[in-house]
Image (tube, rainbow, N blue to C red):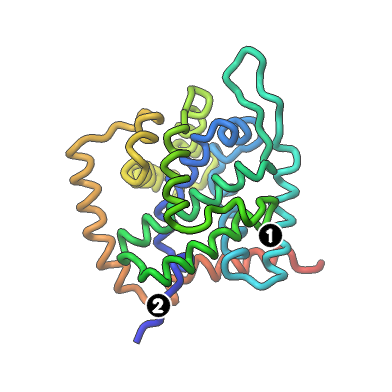
Amino acid sequence: MRTRLLPESEAIILAGAGRAILLQLASPAVGYGVARHSDFASNPMGRLHGTLMYVYAVMAGTPSDRAAASTYVTRMHGPVHGPGDGDAPAPPYDANDPGLQLWVAATLYDTAITVHDRVLGRLPEADADAAYSRYASLGSALRMPRDLWPSDRAAFRRYWQETVETLSVDDVVRAQADALWRATEAPLWVRSLMPLMRFLTAGLLPERVRAEYRMAWDARSQRRFDRLWSVVVPVYAALPTVVRRWPQQYYLRRLRRLTAPR
């Protein structure tokens, strides 16, 4: 019998990477922090590698892995702050703001569960509650107080719906998303995947946020999207466990190589 993996261990959740990123950027304080302190739009693999090493270290790593990843991310967040602009729409931003860390962790959780449920079905209630509790660590491993994470999944849903209604995307943030899809500094194989990733991202985003990014979507797009998943679901389910866990194992090894004593 195949061992059932934890949701965060499933490789398929990486299909939602673009969704999580665009949701994060749609919070203006996050979007402007990234726009002014990050090269992720031209080099998406750099941000992806860093994010995944952190996520897998916190969710599945040893205490040493978690400490190393948290130290690294906290150091990277140090210079990411600004007062905003007097006559421009840029808000104050600070990557160490617990409220922003809550939102980033929330996008990772909601995206993982959204993709997992679509491909592998809904988790049993006890498993869903356990997964929800584990995802709080993505914020609390940094500077987010644990009690800032909504108390249960119902509270999270209320927080999520209320926060999505506050998201907005202006030309500065929209340009970051457009540059992400061009990925001019990324390897050719990454650039070749970007049209597919953009399509998946558009389909997975909440309708309101998709509209903020001006990503076209209609009934024909939805039919294509549904057909794509109808192929992905049985193919992914047939993959051996070692393949489905490969990204997690790869990024844990990568982190350990980077943090090993010289």
Residue type at mark 2 is Arg
Mark 2–mark 1 distance (CA, rounded to whole Å) = 26 Å
Decide which of 233, 243 is in the foreground and name it: 233
- Where residue 167 appears, as percent x and y from the top left, is 47, 33
In the rendered image, the quadrant that contains the N terminus is bottom left
Report the front residue among 80 and 235. 80
Q: Quadrant of residue 37?
A: top right
Tell me which amino acid carries mark 1.
Ala
Which quadrant of the structure image shows residue 182?
Answer: top left
Could you tell me which secondary element the residue under label 1 belongs to? helix
- Residue tagged 2: 4
The answer to whether any part of residue 50 appears in the image is no
Image quadrant of residue 42? top right
Residue depicted at 52% across the width and 37% down the height: 25
The residue beneath circle 1 is 69
Circle on res. 162: none
**Residue 7 versus residue 172 in the image, above or below:** below
Q: Is residue 133 above or below residue 51?
A: below
Q: Which residue is at a point 47% across and 45% down the rendered structure image?
A: 159
Q: Is residue 18 left or right of residue 202?
A: right
Residue at (53, 64) in percent of width and height: 133
Residue under the point 32% across and 37% down: 207
Image x and y of residue 77, in percent: 70, 44
